[in-house]
Image: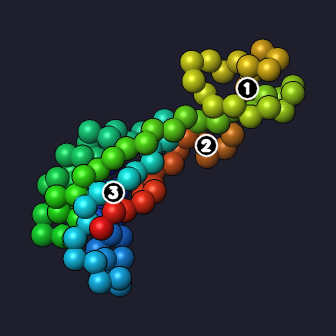
């Protein structure tokens, strides 16, 4: 359910940019979703399809890039993506989450 206000803000941002730049139609929107953001791509798509009607983004294709959280090893200092394990691939120590990592939700690019 928290995707609703996120999609509303996204459409508002796209409308503002479209107006400022004289863009009549947006064809494609590339979004980045972090694994810890709690954002579900299918819900974003559903709300977008409903809310974008009558806006410059109506009918645009949403493309999602999902990114992992980043961990840092307290022993060797290596940073690595969380994949299937929290263990450092260098030394095997349990990594710690880098604050804010994996919580992203952003518009990466737009095709007009």
- Mark 3 Cα shell of 10 Å, populated few (<14), some (14-19), many (≥20): some
Q: Residue at x 80, y 32 (%)?
A: 78
- Point out residue 20 in the picture as x, y percentages from the top left corner: 35, 84
Residue 112 vs 101, above or below: the answer is below
The mark nearer the N terminus, 3 or 1, is 3
The residue wearing badge 3 is: 29
The numbered dot on residue 95 is: 1
Query: SS of the residue at dot 2?
Result: loop
Nearer to the camera, 93 or 14:
14
- Point out residue 44 in the picture as x, y percentages from the top left corner: 28, 47
Q: Residue at x 74, y 19 (%)?
A: 89
Q: Residue at x 73, y 26 (%)?
A: 95
The mark nearer the N terminus, 3 or 2, is 3
Residue 38 vs 12, above or below: the answer is above
Q: Residue at x 12, y 69 (%)?
A: 54
Quarter of the image with the N terminus in it: top left
Residue 51 is at least partly visible in this image: no
The residue wearing badge 2 is: 101
């Amino acid at each position: 359910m928290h995707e609703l206000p996120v999609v509303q803000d996204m459409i508002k941002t796209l409308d503002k940019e479209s107006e400022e730049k004289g863009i009549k139609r947006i064809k494609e929107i590339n979004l980045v979703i972090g694994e810890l953001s709690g954002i579900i791509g299918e819900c974003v798509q559903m709300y977008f399809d409903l809310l974008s009607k009558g806006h410059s983004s109506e009918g645009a294709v949403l493309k999602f890039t999902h990114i992992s959280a980043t961990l840092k090893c307290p022993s060797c200092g290596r940073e690595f993506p969380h994949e299937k394990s929290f263990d450092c691939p260098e030394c095997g120590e349990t990594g710690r989450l880098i604050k804010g990592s994996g919580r992203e939700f952003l518009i990466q690019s737009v095709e007009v």
